[in-house]
Image (cartoon, rainbow, N blue to C red):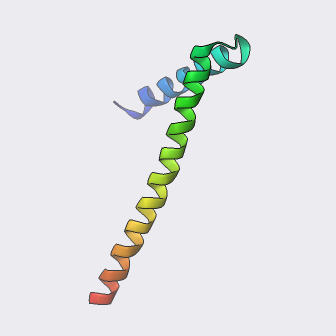
Amino acid sequence: MNKKTFLILAVAYSAVTFILNDVFQTTIGKILMTVSFLALIFLILWFIYSLFNFSIKQYFYHRNH
């Protein structure tokens, strides 16, 4: 999947979630908002893990060289 397709899907998902949650106030909209929130939490945790992992690898690389 290229970057343009992913961006179009992300915008469409955001629009559908906004319409279903804020405009119509449906249960499906609330479920989509929950999925979006969990994805955001997962992304933040993955970023922190990657940052620590990179830092530890850099530390041991500089220690050995």
Residue placed farthest to the front in the image?
A: 27
The quadrant of the rendering that contains the N terminus is top left
**Would residue 35 appear left or right of 27 to someone viewing this image?**
left
- Residue 31 vs residue 1, the one in the foreground: 31
Which of 63 and 24 lies nearest the eye of the viewer?
Answer: 24
Q: Residue at x 49, y 30 (%)?
A: 7
Location of residue 60 in the rendering, given as x and y in whole percent from the top left corner? 32, 82
Closest to the observer, 9 or 18 = 18
Please determine whether, in this image, residue 43 is positioned above or below residue 7. Answer: below
User: Which quadrant holds residue 15?
Assistant: top right
Residue 10: percent from the left, percent from the top? 51, 28
Q: Residue at x 70, y 14 (%)?
A: 25
Residue at the (42%, 34%) spot, across then down: 3
**The image quarter in which residue 65 lies:** bottom left
Above or below: residue 48 compared with residue 60? above
In the rendering, at what x and y percent does residue 63 appear? 32, 88
Q: Is residue 65 visible?
A: no
